[in-house]
Image (cartoon, helix red, strand yellow):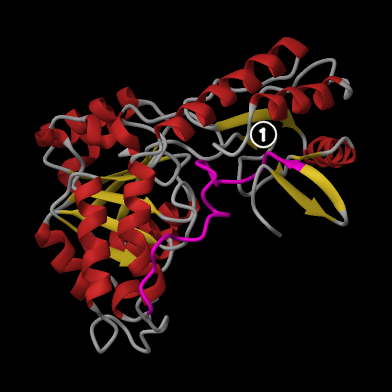
Amino acid sequence: MAHGAHVEVGGRRLLNLSSNDYLGFAAHPPDGLPEVSPGVAASRLITGSDPEHAHAEEALAAYVGCDAARLFSSGYAANVGTIPALVGRGDVIFSDALNHASLIDGCRLSRARIVRVPHGDVGALGEALEEHRAQGRHALIVTDALFSMDGDVADLPAIAALARRHDAWWMVDEAHSLGLLGHEGRGLAHGLPRALRPDVRIGTLGKSFGLHGAFVAGSAALADWLTQRARSFVFSTGVSRTLAAALPRRTERVRAAEHERRRALSLAQRLAAGLKDQGWRVGAPAGAIVPLHVGSDDAVLALGARLERAGVLGQPIRPPTVPPGTARIRLTCTGAHDAADIDGALRAFASLRPPQRAEAP
């Protein structure tokens, strides 16, 4: 499937409102790639490290305001490798209830005690730290910055303050905010005072960057520790030279993409407002994600099929990705869309009668 504002599915051209290509860069080949062989043929600790990897990691670390970074093959690999490298038996993790599956799995693999905190409730997080922090030798707070299924953001300043107060490390996954939110798209955590910034930042390259892979950024000590202790880094073939060589220029392009950022964010607001006016139950987008809440699995599947017949690709999201009874259509706007696309989507939705009683998310 070719990526862009429109895609072809089964011979039909559909408006694509299901992509994570937030800046519209996935269809753009990287600029100015040197002639390098793509494969590295081994893990980074054997023969899989080249100058291209070091240059890419330096560019990414500088972009997010950290001292160092390490490249991983995916955001999933980054999370399931990083968390167990930092905490284990005898430690305690405080995890938002709606964190991404890769964060949840990383927490489980660590074998640390996990305290699940109600979504977005910093008061509950503070109470959990008061009650459970002393039970762990080390403590780690784990959260997404922008939650991929609800489109809302974590209260990072409050989380940072709690982490410092309770002598806890904290880790934020900027998968859906990097490139899109914050000054020059540097993510939500970048706006914090340096003393309050997270100890660990996860960034993915398959969304706003339009490529693939991920990175973990933080202190030089963190990067060195992950090089030796993150099993998904140590025991995986290094990312391709092609990807590594593309990253410095792509990072600069993402940094400079102010027009695409503004467009994606404004179109998400336009879509959400139009759907709400029509009677659909939608969440308020903090980024480019507009969740349209339906409720039951059967109803969301039926709506997704009707949308496709109306010319819009809006993928139904069901359990276990979201809690039971909260099925939804997850809509996303990108820098590749324009106002005419969103107005066309609203016309399609208007032709589909919204439920008489929208089910609560």
Location of residue 102 (image quadrant): bottom left
Q: Is residue 277 left or right of residue 94?
A: right
* Few, some or many residues within 10 Å of mark 1 (<14, 14–19, 20+): many
Q: What residue appears at the point 72 percent right and 10 percent down from the top-left corner?
A: 277
Give, as a three-letter code, the residue at label 1: Thr
x and y percent of residue 132 in the render?
23, 40
Residue located farthest toward the top when viewing the structure as drawn: 277
Q: Is residue 168 left or right of residue 201?
A: left
x and y percent of residue 259 in the render?
45, 31
Does residue 188 belong to the magenta stretch? no
Where 104 falls versus 288 (above or below)? below
- Split into 4 quadrants, where in the image is the N terminus? bottom right
x and y percent of residue 131 in the render?
23, 35
Residue 23 versus residue 295: which sits nearer the camera?
Answer: 23
Location of residue 324 (image quadrant): top right
Residue located farthest toward the front when viewing the structure as drawn: 32
Circle 1 sits on which residue?
326
Location of residue 163 (image quadrant): top left
Does residue 19 belong to the magenta stretch? yes
Label 1 element class: loop
- Magenta segment main secondary structure: loop
Q: Is residue 78 left or right of residue 165?
A: right
x and y percent of residue 71 in the render?
31, 65
Q: Is residue 89 visible?
A: no
Q: What is the span of residues highlighted in magenta in the rendered image?
A: 15-35
Q: What residue appears at the point 89 percent right and 22 percent down from the top-left corner?
A: 351
Q: What residue appears at the point 55 percent right and 20 percent down from the top-left corner?
A: 284
Q: Is residue 139 visible?
A: yes
